[in-house]
Amino acid sequence: MSSAFVKEEDYQPLKDVAPNMASLLIFLKRENGYPVRELHTRFSEKHGLEVHEMSDGLGYAINQNQQWQVVLD
C-alpha cells in the first residue's frame, strides 16, 4: 500500500511538532521517509530567528509562538 494514503488522525502539521530538535528530526524522518540531519545553524536577519539548515534542503526555525516554521531566505 502506498504511503501517500495517510489516515487523517496520523497527520501532524509542522506547527504542532514540539519546539525541540529531537522532535523536528523525528517529524522530518516520518515526512520524508528517510533520516534528515542538521547541516548548520545560522541567524536570519530578515526574520530575526535562529535557522537550522537541514539535509532536506530547507531551513527550520522556532517562531514567537514556539512553533516550527520553514524559513525561505
Image (cartoon, helix red, strand yellow):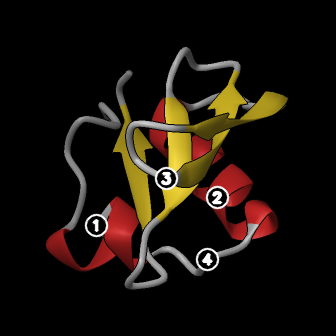
Identify residue type, mark 3.
Gly
Residue at image x 77%, y 61%?
21
Numbered mark located on residue 48 in the image? 3
| Of residues 39 and 36, the one drawn nearer to the viewer in this rendering | 39
Precedes in sequence: disc 1 or disc 3: 1
Residue at image x 61%, y 77%?
19
Numbered mark located on residue 19 in the image? 4
**Mark pair 2, 1: CA separation:** 15 Å
Relative to 44, is 34 above or below? above
Determine whether the residue tagged by mark 2 lies in a helix, strand or loop: helix
Identify residue type, mark 2.
Leu
Relative to 11, is 45 above or below? above
Which mark's residue is nearer the viewer, 1 or 3? 3
Which mark's residue is nearer the viewer, 3 or 4? 3
Precedes in sequence: disc 2 or disc 3: 2
Which mark's residue is nearer the viewer, 2 or 4? 4
Query: Disc 3 vs disc 4: Cβ atoms closer than 8 Å?
Result: no
Which mark's residue is nearer the viewer, 2 or 3? 3
Precedes in sequence: disc 2 or disc 4: 4
- For label 1, count other residues whose C-alpha is less than 10 Å away and answer few (under 14), some (14-19) or many (20+): few
Which mark's residue is nearer the viewer, 2 or 1? 2
How many numbered discs, if any? 4
Precedes in sequence: disc 2 or disc 1: 1
Query: Disc 1 vs disc 3: Cβ atoms closer than 8 Å?
Result: no
Identify residue type, mark 4.
Pro
Numbered mark located on residue 11 in the image? 1
Determine whether the residue tagged by mark 3 lies in a helix, strand or loop: loop
Determine whether the residue tagged by mark 4 lies in a helix, strand or loop: loop
